[in-house]
Amino acid sequence: MRDTLKHRGKRNQLADTIASKGVTDKAVLDAIRSVPRHLFMDSSFEDHAYQDKAFPIAAEQTISQPYTVAYQTALLGIKPGDKVLEIGTGSGYQTAVLLHLKARVYTVERQLELFKKTNLFFRRMGYRPKKFVFGDGYKGLPDEAPFDAIIVTAGAPWVPRPLMSQLAIGGRMVIPVGEEDQTMMLIRRASETEFERQAGGAFRFVPLLEDKG
Ligand code: SAH
């Protein structure tokens, strides 16, 4: 599959749609206009790529709705060079948006099938996260901490402690918290021991699953 002028036109419209829904961060909208979302999906679903909707990918998972990706990314206020931990790589679309913002991205996926597929895709496309780890996002990546930003892209029943402790002071985490529906939580680490929490909109994500092992 290729990226054509037609795709680019649709991405411009998608960015306008997202802006009209309230996400106006220029850098984030630029990423939406740039990242070829249709290439992150099965080619037979190309027509769905630039609708503002979540869509099934492999292993019963979904590629997040573009509005949601934009909303979460805007809340993080990413600056070039920021060290960012992403939990739930999935298709890699959110990862690519973070890379477009020139973040140094560490991303974790727990489904082996998706991990393998997306790993190949990153190589083929030349997307270069600093690390792409097959593992359990509840644990984060303690060896790489602290992170300037942490983004969780699956619904978490609670905020995992290890992720809190892996935030840099002044760092921010965006995480959808709840079982069936989630509230987007923005957590800022104010000091070693103080965390400020702010509740955002309501969303519905696939669940952040715990390791059985
Ligand atoms: N950002 C992705 C969203 C994929 S859906 C995209 O836009 O494509 C959420 C992803 O989180 C799924 O791929 C799922 O397998 C993964 N996931 C669920 N529980 C996890 C865990 N404990 N650790 C890491 N990834 C997890």
Image (cartoon, helix red, strand yellow):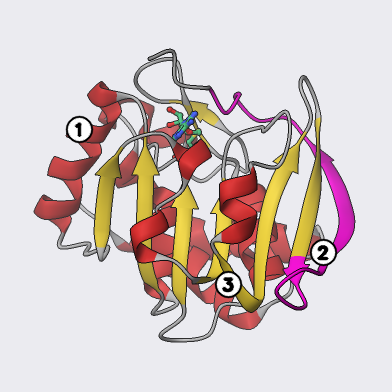
Q: Residue furthest front?
A: 193
Amino acid at circle 2: Gly
Q: Which residue is mark 2?
A: 22
The first of marks 3 and 1 along the sequence is 3
Amino acid at circle 3: Val
- Residue nearer the viewer, 16 or 147: 147
Residue placed at 58% from the left, 52% from the top?
163
Residue placed at 64% from the left, 41% from the top?
160
Q: How many numbered discs, if any?
A: 3
Disc sitting over residue 28 in the figure: 3
Q: Which image quarter: residue 12? A: bottom right
Q: Which residue is mark 1?
A: 117
Q: Residues within 10 Å of mark 1 (few under 14, many from 20)?
A: some
Q: Which image quarter: residue 81? A: bottom left
Q: In the image, is residue 194 part of the stretch drawn in magenta?
A: yes
Rendering coords of residue 155 (x, y %): 66, 32
Report the mark closest to the observer, 2 or 1: 1
Q: Quadrant of the C terminus?
A: top left
Disc sitting over residue 212 in the figure: none
Q: In the image, is residue 206 part of the stretch drawn in magenta?
A: yes
